[in-house]
Image (tube, helix red, strand yellow):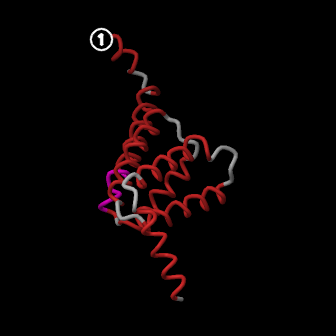
Amino acid sequence: MRFQKARDQTFMDFMNCNKKTPHHIAFFLDHEFRKGFKQVTEEEQGKRLEAVVRLFCCLHGRDVFISQYSNLLAQRLLDKTTLSDWAEEQMVNKLTIECGNNTVNKIKTMFEDMIKSKQLNSDFKSSPSNTAVAKT
């Protein structure tokens, strides 16, 4: 028991001795969403996300990670380069559990805005009057 506690404390100290660790974890996660989840089952994606969340729990700079993660997520959403919407939603759910709703609210809003944008775009394209509006 004492050994495990000392091991965990040492690992947390190691994780937090470098100020860039939250950035590195966010960039790793960004790489996973862009390329790493290619041809990987949802179960394996879930395991990888769970491992990242365990690392996240050791961080003292959680707010730095959240900020970096939300910036990278915004870029993935705009570029449409994410490989798995399911994995993105799972990560948001896991972060909500760890950090609370207020912290992850901005990220959830980004997803909602993308859904609304897709819906508005499809409604506009299917509308019979869109050609008349475009000509004026």
Figure check: 33 above or below 65: above
The residue wearing badge 1 is 136
Quarter occupied by residue 15 = bottom left
Residue found at x 41% / y 28%: 124
Where residue 122 sits: x, y (%)? 46, 32
Helix, strand or loop for the magenta stretch, by majority: helix
Quarter occupied by residue 49 = bottom right
Residue found at x 59% / y 58%: 48
Residue at disc 1, secondary structure? loop
Where residue 136 sits: x, y (%)? 30, 11
Of residues 10 and 33, the one drawn nearer to the viewer in this rendering: 10
Q: Left or right of 19: which side holds 90?
A: right
* Mark 1 neighbour density, 10 Å: few (under 14) some (14–19) many (20 or more): few
State the extent of the magenta-drawn residues as a range. Answer: 102-108
Residue found at x 45% / y 65%: 14
Where residue 43 sits: x, y (%)? 66, 60
Magenta span includes 104? yes
Of residues 76 and 14, the one drawn nearer to the viewer in this rendering: 14
Q: Left or right of 109: which side holds 57?
A: right
Magenta span includes 9? no
For the N terminus, the quadrant is bottom right
